[in-house]
């Protein structure tokens, strides 16, 4: 993941990605793609497009908003907002209406929410002032019952974090990125925080770090980023047990491909990249095997792909409402999430 600065709002942040999932949906289908981009006023907002890149609509309008995450049924979205002065987790309807705050008074910040596949819980990263670095938490879908799952030892040589949680389809385990061993790697824990298992330990000299995991809908694979943290890397995929790791993207250094996210039907992967040139962070799409790479839209960061309500229609998203804002506090070097490497590249 790359740490970057988006219009001076984010500082030293690894990125992440967030997934959506539809374990209990009656039909598998691909709806709209939500992502973050800068509006005409220079603020970070949440937008959505159709899978062919058309129909771009702005869902938030006030302050800075990031990290969209569709519910398993595709009718609502969780996101992070600085509307109240701190980065907190909120929810809204698919059209941007009915915004509801779930977390409160978190001075360090909460970010990167992700729904469990049954829609009953939300995993997220929290940067508490009392802790000083991000850790993985879970809470009920209404914001109650918050529980810290990870307790990461301070790294003596680099940033310290556990973040970017993603649920297994059966809800029993959570994959996330952590610096437990001193470098950023992919780990899996039980949903109650027990039994941590390390899944990556570098992928060769050019890919020492791994981050931004995302579980496939059928639970068979995990897509993730691997490269040099805070610099550049590629999108990789591995089996859910950590075997058969393989690289999916090819971008020439110092450019970066990052923040992968599965389509609900498992046939596509979206990611952000600055491969078009410095200052050109964009959302791209490819087949699940890395073939047929195509540009979708400008924008970057954590994306989320909405499950369609049925096989032939998607939830309409009107561009009204949306009073939320989010800027991850740039408190610690490498602190929190989003726009990682790609953003740094825009300044080089």
Image (cartoon, grey):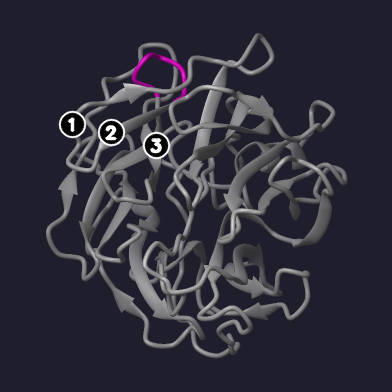
First of labels 3, 2 by sequence position: 3
Q: CA distance from mark 2 to mark 1?
A: 6 Å
Q: Is residue 239 magenta?
A: no
- Quadrant containing the C terminus in the rendered view: top right
Q: Find the magenta span and give its range.
A: 179-185
Picture coordinates of residue 51 (x, y %)? 71, 69
First of labels 3, 1 by sequence position: 3
Marks 3/2 in contact by CB < 8 Å: the verdict is yes
Q: Which residue is mark 3?
A: 176
Q: Which residue is mark 2?
A: 189
User: At 66% across and 54% down in the image, what residue appears?
Assistant: 267
First of labels 2, 1 by sequence position: 2
Marks 2/1 in contact by CB < 8 Å: the verdict is yes
User: At 68% across and 73% down in the image, what residue appears?
Assistant: 49
Q: Quadrant of residue 198?
A: top left
Q: Which residue is mark 1?
A: 194
54 sits left or right of 264 in the view:
right
In this view, the residue in front, 169 or 41, is 169
Residue 10 drawn above or below residue 317: above
Marks 3/1 in contact by CB < 8 Å: the verdict is no
Residue 219 drawn above or below residue 69: above
Picture coordinates of residue 137 (x, y %)? 25, 46
Picture coordinates of residue 292 (x, y %)? 84, 49
């Amino acid at each position: 993941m790359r740490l970057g600065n988006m219009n001076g709002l984010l500082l030293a942040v690894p990125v992440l990605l967030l997934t959506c999932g539809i374990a209990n949906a009656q039909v598998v289908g691909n709806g709209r793609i939500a992502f973050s981009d800068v509006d005409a006023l220079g603020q970070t907002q949440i937008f959505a497009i159709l899978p062919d890149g058309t129909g771009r609509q702005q869902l938030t309008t006030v302050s800075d908003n990031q990290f969209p995450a569709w519910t398993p049924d595709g009718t609502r979205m969780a996101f992070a907002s600085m509307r109240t002065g701190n980065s907190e987790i909120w929810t809204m309807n698919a059209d941007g209406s009915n915004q509801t705050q779930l977390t409160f008074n978190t001075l360090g910040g909460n970010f990167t929410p992700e729904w469990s596949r049954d829609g009953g819980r939300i995993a997220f990263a929290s940067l508490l002032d009392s802790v000083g670095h991000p850790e993985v938490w879970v809470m009920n879908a209404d914001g109650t019952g918050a529980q810290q799952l990870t307790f990461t030892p301070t790294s003596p040589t680099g940033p310290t974090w556990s973040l970017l949680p993603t649920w297994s389809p059966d809800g029993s385990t959570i994959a996330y990125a952590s610096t437990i061993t001193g470098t950023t790697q992919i780990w899996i824990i039980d949903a109650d925080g027990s039994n941590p298992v390390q899944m990556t330990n570098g992928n060769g000299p050019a890919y020492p770090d791994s981050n931004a995991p995302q579980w496939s809908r059928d639970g068979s694979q995990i897509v993730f980023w691997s490269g040099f943290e805070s610099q550049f890397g590629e999108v990789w995929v591995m089996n859910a047990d950590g075997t058969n790791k393989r690289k999916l993207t090819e971008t020439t250094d110092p450019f970066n491909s990052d923040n992968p996210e599965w389509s609900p039907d498992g046939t596509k992967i979206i990611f952000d990249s600055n491969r078009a040139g410095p200052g050109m962070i964009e959302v791209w799409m490819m087949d699940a095997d890395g073939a047929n790479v195509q540009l979708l839209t400008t924008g970057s960061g954590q994306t989320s792909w909405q499950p369609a309500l049925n096989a032939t229609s998607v939830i309409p998203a009107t561009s009204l409402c949306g009073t939320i804002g989010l800027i991850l506090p740039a408190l610690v070097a490498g602190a929190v999430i989003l726009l990682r490497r790609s953003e740094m590249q825009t300044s080089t």
